Image (cartoon, rainbow, N blue to C red):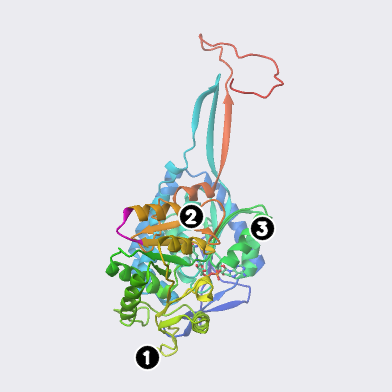
Amino acid sequence: MTRTIPHFVGGSLLTPDSGRFADVFDPSTGSVQARVPLASADEVRRVIADAEAAQPGWAATNPQKRARVLMRFLDLVHRDMDDLARLLSSEHGKTFEDAKGDIQRGLDVIEFATGAPHLLKGEYSTEAGTGIDVYSLRQPLGVVAGITPFNFPAMIPLWKAGPAIAAGNAFVLKPSERDPSVPVRLAELFLEAGLPAGILNVVHGDKEAVDVLLEDERVKAIGFVGSTPIAEYIYATAAAHGKRAQCFGGAKNHLVVMPDADLGQVVDALIGSGYGSAGERCMAISVAVPVGDETADALAAKLTERVAQLRIGPSLADGIDYGPLVTRAAVDRVTDCIQQGVDAGATLLADGRGLVVEGYEEGFYLGPTLFDHVTTDMSIYREEIFGPVLVIARARDYEEALAIASDHEYGNGVGIFTRDGDAARDFAARVNVGMVGVNVPIPVPLGYYTFGGWKRSGFGDLNQHGPDSFRFYTKTKTVTSRWPASPLRSVAEPVEAGASFVMPTTR
Ligand code: NAD
């Protein structure tokens, strides 16, 4: 019988009762390996109630004790790292080593969140007026929720849950229904680390579950990562229900290649960031923008050579560069995008369609695809493909390359490869994109900086992780206090008596 992945609620694995399920595949073989329940609205309301009941006790636990739970969690994840990575790889399709990277980049943010005692400190001004002190407090919001995508089933749930619970909130996670097992295992490890029951809950589901999280007034904030149309829906609906929201969407990340760049480094960077994880990364480079035809011709030739050497196979096999895509539907969608590129007249230098891996004929594989002479009006340039497809959009000069990268409707990540410090500085200052790499292809900021794209890649005014995450998951209270002079102090001066009808000022 097919295994059913449970919800994790109130500190225990919970048998679903909605009667609705989705298939969870092994993308390497194409077979169904489990089924995931799709929670009913009532089930989600019960999860919120559990979280709400648990949260005040956790908020009252001092921040150092809360941080110590995160520290123990780090040890437990390292203890179980290989098992978690294997599980993640088997549902997502990314390689075992890449799966470990997914988990580790999540742990980086847990490490950052162990700084909660420091990060939650308020400000204090003494003698702001005569006998008046002003100070601020950061208080948790209560119950908060995260809705996360399939492509980083460990990293993104941890980016959201770590700072949220360290700040004293209870967290309800609605992970992707395509690879839901690792989030449940992580929640179990949090419990083992000493997190009280009800503080981290994992409920599986689709729009029905998400809509309850968006509409229920007990949920105070929504953190979302996924595709742009859903990000826009979540942002608007959460705001309409009076919640704070940060929603991160799709991407089309460019890499500008200046004529003076080290072409060997550029090709390594493009091959790794364009095709790693089968291109299913929001920070994947999907557009190379070589400056000048000479650079473009050399780049296209070298990329074509390297693409032919890529090894694709089952995600847990040794020596492969990338594994299958997440579902058959994803393969079909990317295949369709490639055909649109051909129809639009782009030059197809490598065609990954129809790849069959021996012994895994039903797996969700696509070979690496490379297009040259792609123009900004083509759908393969405008739309996020989210597969192993790299396009070359040639620029005449630096200014045109800067404009191409800046004018795209997405603004997640961008890179420039050059030996010219002046060009790199100018690019970093002027490009209209949220995260910039200089001779770095996937500029995902470290956990103590913040992560967030611009334009249609990010909605909301605070980013993920880094100091912004503690701002997002707390509300600020500002206290202005005056203590009348005490008769117990011999030097005490009397405070002026009587009502004042003018606006108090410090003048
Ligand atoms: P998705 O938008 O299909 O799903 C994301 C989440 O939303 C899932 O939990 C899903 O169950 C839920 N969802 C889907 N349809 C919904 C609906 N109609 N109503 C309510 N909830 C719904 O995204 P995905 O395919 O899982 O992930 C890939 C996308 O995520 C890509 O576009 C990628 O660029 C993006 N992404 C962005 C970032 C970033 O930080 N900007 C990071 C990772 C992934």
Few, some or many C-alpha atoms within 10 Å of disc 2 (few <14, some 14-19, many ≥20)? Answer: many
Q: Is mark 1 within 8 Å of ligand 1?
A: no
Name the one closer to the observer, 235 or 18: 235
In reply to whether residue 420 is colored magenta, the answer given is yes
Image quadrant assignment for residue 204: bottom right
Name the one closer to the observer, 210 or 193: 210
Q: Are marks 3 and 2 in contact (CB under 8 Å)?
A: no
Q: Which mark is residue 464?
A: 2
> Could you tell me which residue is drawn at 43 percent across and 66 percent down?
254
- The picture quadrant for ligand 1 comes to bottom right
Magenta stretch, residue numbers: 417-421
Q: Is mark 2 within 8 Å of ligand 1?
A: yes
Image quadrant assignment for residue 90: bottom left
The residue that disc 1 covers is 359
Residue 46 in view: no
The residue that disc 3 covers is 216
Name the one closer to the observer, 262 or 188: 262
Secondary element under disc 1, as helix, strand or loop, is: loop
Residue 304 percent location from the top left of the image:
34, 80
- Most common SS among magenta residues: loop
In reply to whether residue 318 is colored magenta, the answer given is no
The residues tagged by marks 2 and 1 sit, at their Cα atoms, a distance apart of 41 Å
Nearer to us: label 2 or label 1: 2
Residue 59 percent location from the top left of the image:
53, 46
> Could you tell me which residue is drawn at 49 percent across and 48 percent down?
470
Q: Is residue 213 left or right of residue 458?
A: right
Residue type indicated by callout 1: Gly
State which tag comes first along the sequence, 3 or 2.
3
Tell me the quadrant of the picture where the C terminus can be found. Answer: top right
Residue 382 percent location from the top left of the image:
53, 71
Nearer to us: label 3 or label 2: 2
